[in-house]
């Protein structure tokens, strides 16, 4: 049994959903510090895809608007200059999710120039793993891709880029038990969350993790004696896709530009998955987004920098 009580629940009904950061929004609920809210979050594409969707549905999906946010929640006593502490207590998926990439002409994803068409995989989720093709199982590590508070700047702001006040930063380590700290810019903070992922590799290279409708349970506090400029967090990981130190297969990208080095590392990993494990290039791209971690190995040996992609060997049957 959980060691907390849920004080408020916000469903994914339309009245609790918005798709812009805007400090003019009225809070759906106002909570006291220490209280707990359970958010029901839609998937990132706002129900345009289902368990039965095909790649054509991915091609025809609209990104305008994208990211249905659940909230906002106001926290009593939160004032500009304070810090909002958000302790993530639990995540519950609904049994399915998807990972996909869009046609290259949309210029979405790390390797959009490598894939002319779109790709889509619908995952079945159980209590511990997401089931992929070829008998591959990716461990679940659920987290919200988006968590943030309203900015002080007037007007409605796009949810796609992350901001000083949080938002779409896709930090895969904001899992159960972690605490996110957000700089507060408006009275009440006005917290919202969305874009939940059942799992994701560091990098989210094909533009989606395992996108999944989900419940997020969080406890709120206001810190008056802490000051930060951008989000900070505490977490126990997991710091590898499976949550443990284990054998990995790595591919390196070396270039005089970090983005180019990153692309090379992922391209080499896609080739490895294709030649050694029998995946198509599209399947490999999707698996890289869900279960391969990117690490910057060095940025000091000018003129070239090194980025590597790490693949956990245990996900294979």
Image (tube, helix red, strand yellow):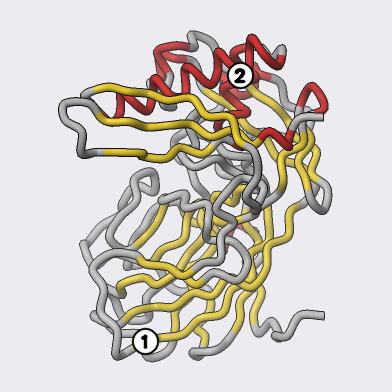
- Please give the count of numbered marks on the rendered protein: 2
Please indicate whether residue 37 sits to the left or right of residue 112 in the image: right
Query: Residue 213's x, y, as percent?
Result: 67, 50
Q: Tell me if residue 185 comes above or below residue 195 in the rendering.
A: below
Query: Residue 295's x, y, as percent?
Result: 42, 40
Report which residue position mark 1 lands on. 223
Where is the N terminus found, in terms of image quarters?
A: bottom right
Location of residue 143 by image quarter: bottom right
Where is the C terminus found, in terms of image quarters?
A: top right
Residue 69 bears which disc, if any?
A: none
Q: Nearer the viewer, residue 3 or 271?
A: 271
The CA distance from mark 1 to mark 2 is 44 Å
Assign a secondary structure to mark 2. strand
Q: Badge 1: few (under 14), some or many (20 or more) residues near its Cα, within 10 Å?
A: many
Q: What residue lies at 33% left-to-right and 25% top-to-bottom?
A: 261
Report which residue position mark 2 lands on. 119
Q: Tell me if residue 146 comes above or below residue 181 in the rendering.
A: above
Farthest residue, direction left? 303
Query: Residue 250's x, y, as percent?
Result: 52, 29
Q: What residue lies at 61% left-to-right and 20% top-to-bottom?
A: 284
Please indicate whether residue 301 sits to the left or right of residue 118 in the image: left
Location of residue 308 by image quarter: top left
Q: What residue lies at 40% left-to-right and 86% top-to-bottom?
A: 222
Assign a secondary structure to mark 1. strand
Query: Residue 56's x, y, as percent?
Result: 64, 16
């Amino acid at each position: 049994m959980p060691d907390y009580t849920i004080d408020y629940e916000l469903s994914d009904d339309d009245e609790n959903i918005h798709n812009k950061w805007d400090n003019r929004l009225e809070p759906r609920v106002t909570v006291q510090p220490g209280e707990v809210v359970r958010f029901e979050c839609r998937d990132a594409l706002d129900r345009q895809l289902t368990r039965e969707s095909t790649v054509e549905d991915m091609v025809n999906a609209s990104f305008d608007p994208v990211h249905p946010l659940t909230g906002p929640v106001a926290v009593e006593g939160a004032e500009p200059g304070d810090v909002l502490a958000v302790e993530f207590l639990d995540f519950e998926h609904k049994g399915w999710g998807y990972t996909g990439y869009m046609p290259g002409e949309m210029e979405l994803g790390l390797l959009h120039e490598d894939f002319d068409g779109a790709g889509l995989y619908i995952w079945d989720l159980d209590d511990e793993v997401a089931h992929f093709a070829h008998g591959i199982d990716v461990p679940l590590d659920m987290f919200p891709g988006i968590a943030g508070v309203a900015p002080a700047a007037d007007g409605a702001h796009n949810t796609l880029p992350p901001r000083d006040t949080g938002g779409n930063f896709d930090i895969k380590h904001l899992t159960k038990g972690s605490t996110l700290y957000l700089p507060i810019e408006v009275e009440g903070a006005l917290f919202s969350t969305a874009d939940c992922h059942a799992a994701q590799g560091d990098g989210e290279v094909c533009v989606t993790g395992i996108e999944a409708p989900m419940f997020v349970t969080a406890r709120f506090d206001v810190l008056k004696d802490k000051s930060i400029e951008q989000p900070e967090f505490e977490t126990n990981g997991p710091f590898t896709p499976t949550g443990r130190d284990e054998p990995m297969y790595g591919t390196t990208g070396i270039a005089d530009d970090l983005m180019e080095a990153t692309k090379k590392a992922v391209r080499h990993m896609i080739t490895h998955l294709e030649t050694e494990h029998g995946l198509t290039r599209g399947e490999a791209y999707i698996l890289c987004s869900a279960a391969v971690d990117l690490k910057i190995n060095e940025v000091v040996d000018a003129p070239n920098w090194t980025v590597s992609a790490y693949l956990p060997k245990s996900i294979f049957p």
